[in-house]
Structure formats: structure tokens, C-alpha cells
Image (cartoon, rainbow, N blue to C red):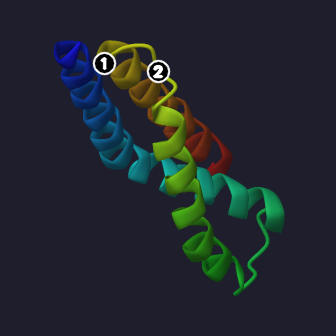
Amino acid sequence: MARNDALSSWQLLHHGLVGAVLGFPLAVWLSGLLVFHLTSGHDDPAKYQVAMWSVVPLWAATVGLSFMARGKLACWAWLIGANAVAAALVHGVSR
């Protein structure tokens, strides 16, 4: 039984680290989308404050959600895919 506990604790550590590393750029991309949506592209000086303060809650939510992945590969795949989609959306919206 100790062997299963060790494997599950390593898997939890893995998910947490992957969520932290890949969650930060995802949070930055998502805050950019949020700011663009809230300001509708207008030049509002407060939008930079919204972007700055929204990164940390989005990052924490991403790390928390990374524990829902079934395996290590699924954790990597979902977060890389989410980063790719968010980056594409930010680049598409900014044009």
C-alpha cells in the first residue's frame, strides 16, 4: 500500500509543477483576453491594472485544475493545448 501512496504523491507533485510552469503563461494569455473583452479594444489606462491583478487568480485556478488530469501525459497535453488556443485567440483578437 505504501508503494501506491508514493506513486500518487509523485503524480500530484508532477501535476502541481506542470500546472505552475504551464499555468503562468496561460494565465497571462487569459488575462490579455479578459482585458481586451472588458475594454472592447479601447485605450483605457486601467486595463493594465486589470491585466496585472487578474493573472494571479487565473494562475491559481489553472494550478488547481491541473490536478483533475488523469495522467501525466494528459496534464501536459491539456495545458499545452490550452496555451496554444489562448495564444492563437490573443493574436487573432489583437489584429
Who's the residue at 54% across and 64% down the image? 55
Location of the N terminus (image quadrant): top left
Residue 40 appears in the figure: no
Q: In screen coordinates, is 85 left or right of 45?
A: left
Query: Spatial distance from mark 1 to mark 2, Cα to Cα?
Result: 7 Å
Q: In screen coordinates, is 12 left or right of 41?
A: left
Secondary element at tag 1: helix
Q: In screen coordinates, is 88 left or right of 14?
A: right
Q: Is residue 94 above or below residue 74?
A: below
Residue picked out by circle 2: 69
Report the residue that reaches farthest toward the front.
1
4 or 62: which is nearer to us?
4
73 or 44: which is nearer to us?
73
Disc 2 crowd, CA 10 A, few/some/many (<14, 14-19, 20+): some
Residue 72 appears in the figure: yes
Disc 1 crowd, CA 10 A, few/some/many (<14, 14-19, 20+): some
Residue 51 picture location, percent across and down: 61, 70
Q: Is residue 70 above or below residue 88?
A: above
Q: In screen coordinates, is 49 left or right of 26?
A: right
8 or 25: which is nearer to us?
8
Residue picked out by circle 1: 72
Residue 39 picture location, percent across and down: 81, 68
Residue type at mark 1: give it.
Lys
Residue type at mark 2: give it.
Ala
Residue 31 picture location, percent across and down: 61, 59
Q: Is residue 7 above or below residue 30?
A: above
Who's the residue at 28% across and 25% down the image? 11
Report the residue that reaches farthest toward the bottom.
45
Residue 80 picture location, percent across and down: 39, 28
Who's the residue at 61% across and 38% down the image? 89
